[in-house]
Image (cartoon, helix red, strand yellow):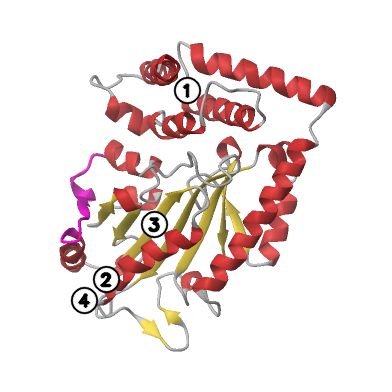
Amino acid sequence: MAWYSTTGKACDTVISTRVRLARNINGYHFPSRLDVSAANEIIEKVSAPLESSGFRKINFADLSPIMATSYVERHYVSPEFATKDAPHALLLQEQSGIAVMVCEEDHLRIQCILPGLSLEEAYQNAARTEKRLDEDFDFAYSEELGYLTHCPTNLGTGMRASVMMFLPALTKGGYMDSLSTQLSKIGLTIRGLFGEGSGAAGCMYQISNQITLGITESDIISKLSEAVRQIIESEHKARKAITGDALERLTDRIMRSEGVLKHAYMMSSSEFIKLYADVRFGISLGIIQDISYEQLGTLLVEAMPATLTLSSENTPKSESARDKLRAQKIKSLLQNKQKA
């Protein structure tokens, strides 16, 4: 299942939804203090029930750095997980959007990522997997503090819910700092495309909860849902406010971006992200009609450096060769859609 929004609700502003549950198993140190033997033991114990339930096990110790990075680009794992030296593994059930990182910051990071605005469904999917594992493992839990986690900011529910949003009008209008301040007052935060510490590339932002202690899972989903609804309204209002000469200039830039996206001979990943934002904005405004959200979502994964390299029969030997390959990939996907 693709993580990006194709036909989901509010797909002009909401790209995807993710819910993640952090859990640790009693009797073991946190991953930062685990020895190799204990880490491998946890991986094997957790893998058994999940593999029997249809999950695919990916041992990251066996992966090349570029293959591990590709999983980051597809949002199945964190950048920190991909580069970790100690034993760690991913259990993946792509059809339902569920990925379980084993031995990341916590023993288990159970996450479900779905296209569009799907908070309740993503939570139910993650909770179902957590319940299955709870049958076999004694999770570290305190009546006072809730689920015990490596980072104190995850204590309580151990849950992080986030919605990936596309906010070009608010970004271009200079409203994001104000929005960030407003969200922090109600226990929410804004992160970039690849989570904590990443930049807000392509006007894409993750809106997520900051507070996990003293609040229920349903409270988190309810608060985040209401905030997302208000942000959608603000973004649409900001888009409608673009009129006259400003709209003419924006239309010109969007159409130029479409032309470059379709016809460039070489293209860097940073240039692609900028063009992606313009073209996606153009689709939402009705300026571009022969490119779909689905096509752009596919490219948002396949044009990324690691995933692009892995898809090639001949590994690009230089950055310029990869930029040429990216332009070819983009052109091929867009042309195939037009012929169909």
Question: Circle 2 is placed at which residue position?
Answer: 132
Q: Position of residue 58 (x, y in %)?
A: 21, 50
- Look at the picture and state if 7 lies above or below 146: above
Dot 4: what SS? loop
Which residues fall within the magenta stretch?
A: 51-64
Horizontal side of 147 relative to 248 (left or right) equals left
Q: In the structure shown, which secondary structural element does the residue marked by tag 2 occupy?
A: helix
Label of residue 112 in the image: 3
For mark 3, does the 10 Å Cα neighbourhood hold few (<14), some (14 to 19), or many (20 or more) residues? many
**How far apart in space, not on screen, are marks 1 and 3 (Cα)?**
30 Å
Separation of residues labelled 3 and 2 (CA atoms): 15 Å
Name the image quarter holding the C terminus.
top left
Asked if residue 313 can be seen in this view, the reply is: yes
* Label drawn at residue 136: 4
Which residue: 15% across, 61% down?
A: 52
Which of labels 4 and 2 is toward the front?
2
Q: Residue at x 24, y 19 (%)?
A: 314
